[in-house]
Amino acid sequence: MAETAAKQEALSKTRLRLWLKLLKSVNGIEAEIRRNLRDQHGTTLPRFDVMSALARFPDGLKMSELSTFLKVSNGNVTGIVDKLTEEGLALRVAVPGDRRAQVARLTPKGRAAFEELATHHETWIDELLDGWSAEDIAALSSRLDLVLKRQSQEESGNAK
């Protein structure tokens, strides 16, 4: 019995160390992406994220949908969309039948700018994960899918 408890405690500590390595890795990658976006493109990760979301939805998203999709507050996306609009990279269109709602979408200029950013972003990630085989990626991805599935189930359970 004591041996089983000791093994469980050792496994628990190993899981904790794994979590800390994952966190450190993700934070390091994010810092590198932020630095590259700032230094090479004069932009920010939140701005990239907004443009990425809008690129996925060519018909646009209501501001509330955009903030929900990005899991940030409406205030966070409003300022970014305002700036993108000022620069001609995005536009806001009124939603018929709802005077208060607006849909944000990328302009052709915005789509072209995002595509350039996305190409560089993919290159940076590719460089940061160089040396990983397809099997390595598939194995980690599979394990992380289990974590995400569990989180989703817990969120669904909490929403009830």
Image (spheres, rainbow, N blue to C red):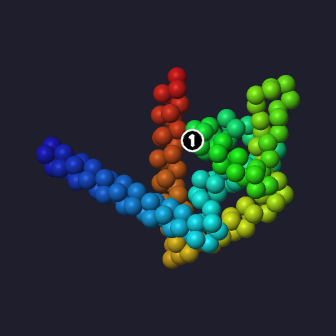
Q: Is residue 58 above or below residue 75?
A: below
Identify which residue, 52 or 78, lies in the foreground: 78
Measured from the top left, where is residue 65 in percent x and y? Answer: 68, 37
Instruction: State the count of labels.
Output: 1
Measured from the top left, where is residue 81 in percent x and y? Answer: 70, 47
Measured from the top left, where is residue 58 in percent x and y? Answer: 80, 49
Picture quadrant of residue 109: bottom right
Name the residue at 22% across, 49% down. 9
Identify which residue, 27 or 75, lies in the foreground: 75
Q: Is residue 154 above or below residue 53?
A: above
Measured from the top left, where is residue 155 in percent x and y? Answer: 50, 33
Question: Element at badge 1?
Answer: loop
Q: Which residue type does callout 1 highlight?
A: Val
Give the left or right position of residue 141, taking residue 80 as reference: left
Of the 4 image quadrants, the one containing the N terminus is top left
Name the residue at 76% across, 56% down. 87
Q: For the view shown, which residue lies furthest in the left direction?
A: 2
Q: Is residue 5 visible?
A: yes
Name the residue at 82% across, 44% down. 59
Q: Residues within 10 Å of mark 1 (few under 14, many from 20)?
A: few
Give the left or right position of residue 5, taking residue 112 as reference: left
Give the left or right position of residue 12, taking residue 104 as reference: left
Name the residue at 32% across, 53% down. 15
Q: Residue under label 1, please give it.
A: 72
Identify which residue, 56 or 61, lies in the foreground: 61
Q: Is residue 130 above or below residue 8?
A: below
Identify which residue, 29 or 15, lies in the foreground: 29
Q: For the view shown, which residue lies furthest in the front direction?
A: 86
Q: Is residue 69 visible?
A: no
